[in-house]
Amino acid sequence: MNVLVTDPIAEPGLDRLREAGHDVETAYDVEGDDLRSAVADAGALVVRSGTEVGREVFEAAPELTIVGRAGIGVDNIDIDAATEHGVIVANAPEGNVRAAAEHTVAMTFAAARSIPQAHGRLKQGEWAKSDYLGTELNGATLGIVGFGRVGQEVAKKLDGLGMNLVAYDPYISEERAGRLGAELVELDECLAQADVLTLHTPLTPETEDLISSDELDRMDGGFLVNCARGGVVDEDALAAAVEAGTLRGAAIDVFADEPLSPDSPLLDVDDVVVTPHLGASTHAAQENVATDIADQVLSAFRNEPVMNALNAPSMDASAFPRVRPYLDIASTAGKIATQLLDGRVEGIEIRYAGEIAEEELDLVTASALEGVFEPLEWQVNAVNAPQIADERGIDVTESKTRQSEDFQSLVTVTVKNGDQEVGVCGTLFAGEDPRIVRIDGFRVDAIPAGHMLVARNKDAPGVIGFIGTVLGDSDINIAGMFNARGTIGGEALTVYNLDHAVPEDLRERLEADERIIGTRYIALNGTE
Ligand SMILES: NC(=O)c1ccc[n+]([C@@H]2O[C@H](COP(=O)([O-])OP(=O)(O)OC[C@H]3O[C@@H](n4cnc5c(N)ncnc54)[C@H](O)[C@@H]3O)[C@@H](O)[C@H]2O)c1
Ligand SMILES: O=C(O)[C@H](O)COP(=O)(O)O
């Protein structure tokens, strides 16, 4: 597969991809048409924050399976567009947390002790000792906005330096904050108490301009540190607040537009310390995120769960071997069910029974949906299948029960509309042989692979012989067959595993016989 890398990634990550046999192309600073043409044959795109991955990129990338973000923030990636195009977006949320927290601590000191300003003047030969009287962090209050991985790591480090901690994060519990010695407060309270306010939220519509002039006014002469995302702070308001002395200073690593324009008002204010988005720039962090994302790209290429996928179901790697065979079973059951339903699919029910019900099954459900939608020729995969169901108003329900009549584990996919309902059940025999064991209420035993013909017929002498003769006349060999019937002389259902595809005219010939109620040809995995 081709992997396109458009921001600098540490070599060990690239090596891991190459060693797995993939072609890695690096093309830094590409955008617009250049990016679209570079990505045209890429199976994976690996980026940091420097590449804008918008909808037009997905439209230009028919082979793309995954966009891997070697780092945390994914605000540069249009995740909705990725999902619509069936592309996984994954990040590496752990590997640079310590680096980001350390940089935050460094920036806090830089602002509180005016280190860059004093350094600059001394380098120019000026001994400006009496101009700098710093703020001691010991005993001061740190306000943390966004108490996730980085926020918590910063809390640990600055708690160790004797700061009092308050935190604002509407999505975490008081107990979690308390365990790290922080008091969870509302934003207003956090602003009022903070001698140093440090930001650690993602950039989302909710956090954009979260800190603007009103909020800065409430800070009462403290410092603001932003090593999260630029758009969280209104930069004009920040520059004005520091200029006016409402804030004593600020230390900023991230900007609404990067690279920062030389015209930014932040550069004109002496008490604003800036670094060019260096939070994650340590050797250790870069190696961590590069190898983490390479592993996830490899998982995506192998069709395995992608650990930090943001728009696709994932699962614990240790559980995957137990669940893996059911992905195919669910997809096949879905494919068969949808082709036996007359009219449009309005509802889908996926039922898990027996041991399988104890597993994490989002991935299997997505696979069942993919199977249902595939014959309808929608551009579908397990990434976008749940969204497609939602957009088309198809009601999806999932249920689990530990009870399973005759099988260790059973997956049933039922598709329905106002007129009809068709359920198909699959299982694993001896833990490894997939089987379809029920179709539309008939007990069967069919191998779910290759060319299948499902015939509904009257239970009458000679029907099976007739179907065999018609297939034989067209040189279509029957590899396996299972006939199931309800009552004697009632309706029967026969499943054939065949060596070749069944042409339309052959089905017409079969259906012309009054004993045949209907036939469906279904091509499953392994057909040529
Ligand atoms: N400067 C750098 O190089 C650098 C390095 C690493 C991370 N980052 C950035 O730091 C930020 C935090 O990363 P993380 O790994 O801690 O993320 P995280 O997801 O672990 O934590 C983010 C926290 O923000 C909280 N949050 C969300 N919306 C909020 C709101 N409206 N108000 C308050 N809190 C809110 C969430 O509940 C969560 O606890 C991200 O923006 C990331 O991109 C920057
Ligand atoms: O979100 C992140 O991981 C950091 O902001 C680092 O971004 P970078 O990889 O572009 O340095």
Image (cartoon, rainbow, N blue to C red):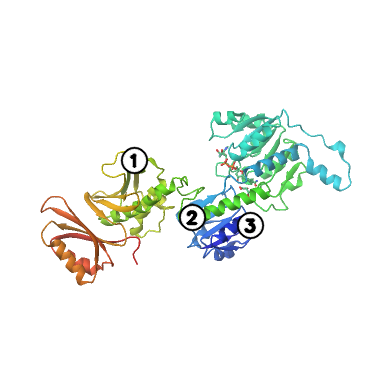
- Which quarter shows the C terminus? bottom left
Quarter of the render that holds ligand 1:
top right
User: Which of the 4 quarters of the picture holds residue 134?
Assistant: top right
How many numbered marks have been drawn onto this rendered protein structure?
A: 3
Image spot of residue 489 (x, y percent):
10, 54
Instruction: Return the residue found at the far front.
Output: 430
Q: Earlier in the sequence, mark 2 or mark 1?
A: 2
Other-residue count near label 3 (Cα within 10 Å), few / some / many at <14 / 14–19 / ≥20: few
Q: Is residue 406 left or right of residue 277?
A: left
Residue topped by disc 3? 11
Q: Amino acid at mark 2?
A: Ala
Residue at horizontal 51 percent and vertical 61 percent from the top: 43
Front position in the image: 62 or 465 = 465
Q: In what element is the residue under mark 3?
A: helix
> Which residue has dot 2 on it?
300
Badge 1 density bin: few <14, some 14–19, many ≥20, Cα 10 Å: some
Q: Do we see residue 8 in this rendering?
A: no
The residue lying at 68 percent from left, 44 percent from top is 236
